[in-house]
Amino acid sequence: MNRKLGSAVAMAATLFLGVPLGSAGDGQSELYPGAATFIYPPHRPYRSDVIIRPLSECAYTTNDSYEQVLSFYDKKGTRYRSPDERVEELRNGQALKHVVVILDGAPDLSMSQHWVILERPFPVGAVIVNGQVQPAEIRDVTRISLMTRTASESASVACAK
């Protein structure tokens, strides 16, 4: 592709999708090295009450420590501090480490078009225990969810494999 056409395509992607090509939204430059694609079980409830649709998520897992993965993303963005940030305790007594890193330089999550959610351990699925929703399974891996706000419900983001 010639340089002029490539610039026009990149500009159109930025204007229409809200995500610049070849930068924070390309799905490749911010993927943690060695992370494996994760496919969610069907009919999973969406856990976040912070995120506004439309949204695309590319989910990955790694056996590397939460701190190691967080160090990688700290170099690429800014941690978002939620006003109601708290440590969750899972039913097995483990503390759930959870952080959001804004990757596109936005001042907060409501303005961001691209961010990553890191979590360890990784609760998968849901069951009801004593009237409360609990994870069906707790995996000792770090979850990496690359989130991109899209222009519409039908828009999608190609996830790295």
Image (cartoon, helix red, strand yellow):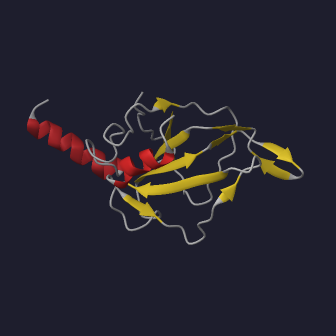
Tell me residue 124's x, y (percent): 67, 39
Residue placed at 83% from the left, 53% from the top? Answer: 132
Would residue 84 be found to the left or right of residue 54 on screen?
A: right
- In the image: residue 114, left or right of residue 133: left
Front-most of 4 and 36? 36
Q: Residue furthest right?
A: 130
Q: Residue at x 16, y 37 (%)?
A: 6
Please report the residue visible at 41 percent of the width from the left and 30 percent of the height from the top: 34
**Residue at point 29% right, 52% down?**
15
Residue that protrudes farthest toward the left in the picture: 3
- Quadrant location of residue 103? bottom left
Name the spot of residue 157 as percent of width and height, x first: 42, 38
On the question of residue 150 being in view, the answer is: no
How far across and how far down the image is residue 54, in percent? 51, 50
Residue 48 in view in this figure = yes
Position of 58 relative to 150 (above/below) = above
Residue 3, located in which quarter of the rendered image? Answer: top left
